[in-house]
Amino acid sequence: MRLVSVRELRGRSAAIWKELAEEKDLVITSNGKPIALLSATTEETLEESLAAVRRSRVLAEVTAMQQASLKAGTDQFTQKEIEAEIEAVRRERAR
């Protein structure tokens, strides 16, 4: 996958758009670090593409939560303990 700096994108945008049509995905960087993905799409595939990106983000978040739960040992909570924790958070938020 090709990396494109913000500066390059600003200075060569027409060439980058043509390259995007061929590459399909580009990584935008700022100070050498990735900050965004640029993906080719069309009117016909826009909604499907957005849904796929959103599904991917949700999956990554769920995986991260599961790993954090394993690390913290909270994966061993009983249903009763989970409900008590939820109730405690709700009481705290109601204040």
Image (cartoon, rainbow, N blue to C red):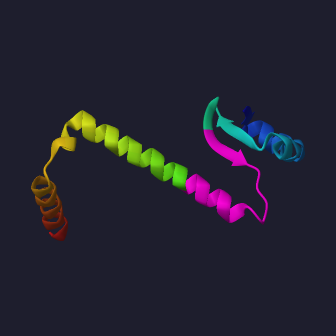
- Nearer-the-camera pick, 39 or 29: 39
Q: Residue at x 76, y 38 (%)?
A: 7
Q: Residue at x 30, y 39 (%)?
A: 68
Is 85 within the magenta?
no
Measured as percent of width and height from the top left, residue 31 is found at 64, 31
Question: Is residue 77 left or right of 40 when viewed as pictured?
Answer: left
The total of numbered circles placed on residues is: 0
Q: Quadrant of residue 29?
A: top right
Q: Quadrant of the N terminus?
A: top right
Residue sitting at the far top: 32
| Residue 36 higher or lower than 34, as above or below | below
Q: Residue at x 79, y 37 (%)?
A: 8
The residue stretch that appears in magenta: 35-54
Q: Quadrant of residue 26?
A: top right
- Nearer-the-camera pick, 5 or 37: 37
Q: Residue at x 13, y 50 (%)?
A: 78
Question: Is residue 53 left or right of 12 when viewed as pictured?
Answer: left
Q: Quadrant of residue 5?
A: top right
| Residue 17 higher or lower than 41, as above or below | above
- Nearer-the-camera pick, 88 or 10: 88
Question: Is residue 17 left or right of 81 when viewed as pictured?
Answer: right
Is 49 within the magenta?
yes
Measured as percent of width and height from the top left, residue 19 is found at 85, 41
Q: Quadrant of the C terminus?
A: bottom left
Measured as percent of width and height from the top left, residue 53 is found at 59, 53
